[in-house]
Each structure stands twice: as C-alpha cells, then as structure tokens.
Amino acid sequence: MGHVILLKPKPNGTLVFDALLPDQGPVSFSTGTDIAPFESVVRDPKTYKKFGEVILTQTCLEEGELDFANVVLSDIKYYQLLSEIFGTKLNSISTTTRENSQLMGRLTDRLENGRFKFYTGDSLKVHLNRIMICGSRDMLKSQRDTCEGVGIFDGSNTEQGHFVIQKAFVD
C-alpha cells in the first residue's frame, strides 16, 4: 500500500489499434503469458465497435498454461453486461504443443496447412484480417513470415498496416 502508479492517457508501444488499418479482426496470436496484453483488448467495448469479431489465440506447452485465457473468457461470459456487449463476437482458439489436448499443435503451423480456416471459417487474407502478435522470438518470426507470405504488411504508429507485432523481442 502507499505505492503510486502513473498511467499515461493514451496507450503506446507496438500492440495498438492505431497501427492497424480499419477492417475486420483483430486476430491475436500469443504464446504462454504473452496473452496478457490482449486481456484489455478483449474487454474493451471499443474493440468490438471498431472491428466486430475478435479471435483470441494462445499456444502453450501444456493445458495448465492456458488457464489465464480461460479465466479472462469465463469472466466475460459470467458478467452479464460484458456478455451482452460481446455476445458471440469473441472467439478463442487454444492449442498445446507438448501435452495432449483437444487442439494440439502450433497455430503458426495451422496457418500454413490450412487448418486455421477450419476453426475460424476463413484463412488470413490481405483484405480481411487485422492481426496482433505477441510471443516468443521464434513465434514472432514465424508469424511475421506467414503474414508477409500472404501479402499482409506490418503496421506502425507512423503507417497503418495489416498486423502489429510485439517489438520487444524482435531482432
């Protein structure tokens, strides 16, 4: 107690909506605890006014590591006001890579082999998706390569694009 927390009036960094072109989305890709930055995104009614549907994804080694996302989603469904605002606009895909689970495998692999379309109804497309990526260094590189491979370009605070990526761990 007694600690002071200073908050800036406007979000900044690389995982912000201002860096994304307006359209559908966003799809968020995360690994492990890197899902944390998306908690505020999925709880903010402005997200759904600007984009409509949100797809929250997370890939972890084991199912227990998916608990944080499950709690966030449960909270939204539990609180009637949030549930009424978001309805069916918030969807999630959780996968594991080491422990057997309902969905096994990396989401980056699902993008490349077409299985992502099976779970979302569509594949990544230049005219459709707005993507936010936060994860391990290898995952960030793989996601960037996948996005650029289908013609989706990186956005920034100076020029909007199709995807934004956590820059803290990118070489």
Image (spheres, rainbow, N blue to C red):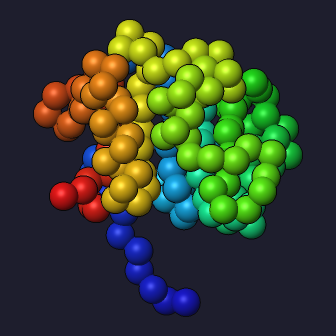
Q: Position of residue 62 (x, y in %)?
A: 70, 64
Residue 170 seen in the current view = yes
Residue at position x 50%, y 24% in the image: 25
| Extreme-front residue of the structure | 113
Q: Residue 130 sits in which quadrant?
A: top left
| Left or right of 118, for residue 40 | left
Identify the image quadrant of the C terminus: bottom left
Nearer-the-camera pick, 118 or 113: 113
In the displayed structure, would residue 7 be above or below residue 59? below
| Left or right of 44, for residue 82 | right
Q: Residue 61 sits in which quadrant?
A: bottom right
Nearer-the-camera pick, 148 or 83: 148
Residue at position x 41%, y 60% in the image: 136
Q: How many marks?
A: 0
Q: Residue 85 sits in which quadrant?
A: top right
Nearer-the-camera pick, 130 or 60: 60
In the displayed structure, would residue 159 be above or below residue 122? below
Residue 120 seen in the current view = no
Nearer-the-camera pick, 135 or 54: 135
Residue at position x 63%, y 56% in the image: 97
| Left or right of 59, for residue 157 | left
Q: Position of residue 26 (x, y in %)?
A: 49, 29
Q: Position of residue 76 (x, y in %)?
A: 75, 44
| Extreme-left residue of the structure | 158
Q: Position of residue 111 (x, y in %)?
A: 51, 30
Residue at position x 68%, y 31% in the image: 90
